[in-house]
Image (cartoon, grey):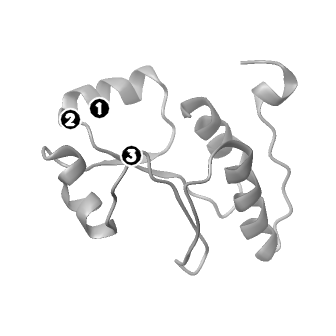
Amino acid sequence: MYQHERSLVKQLADKPFALIGVNSDGDVDYIKKTAREKNLNWRSFWNGPDGTRGPIARAWRIKGWPTIYVIDHQGVIRYQDVRGSSMDEAITTLLAEMGHEVTITHAEDEGGH
């Protein structure tokens, strides 16, 4: 999903959009290394040394990884566990509600990687 997420962050940089990740790996050094190697261009938080049982997962009642929430501008969870084109549709819908018409494209849509 990293390629898709990088593309979203880049395409929507001038829109009211933020991608936030929560990482459940127990080794914070591994997480930092992976973030650099995979060129993650969004804010990501560490769920702590307890991994999937860490404080963020407990607070949000996360039962499976990855869990995806698409939250609107009022802080309401509007979509859950959408991926790929379904995630794009959710995001464009919410941006349109705020008056921002966007078309999201990805390299894989054009035959690239």
Would you say 105 lies left or right of 79 here?
right
Question: For the N terminus, which image quadrant?
Answer: top right
Crowd band around label 1 with a 10 angstrom C-alpha radius: few (<14), some (14–19), many (20+): some
The Cα atoms of the two marked residues, 3 and 2, are separated by 17 Å
Q: Secondary structure at mark 3?
A: loop
Residue at 72% x, 69% y is 94
- Do the CB atoms of the residues marked 3 and 2 lie less than 8 Å apart? no
Image quadrant in which you'd find residue 16: bottom right
Residue at 60% x, 36% y is 6
Residue at 68% x, 42% y is 84
Residue 46 locus on image (x, y percent): 26, 47
Q: Return the residue at label 2.
A: 28
Q: In the rendered structure, which amino acid carries the disc numbered 3?
A: Trp
Q: In the rendered structure, which amino acid carries the disc numbered 1?
A: Ile
Residue at 33% x, 56% y is 63
The Cα atoms of the two marked residues, 3 and 1, are separated by 15 Å
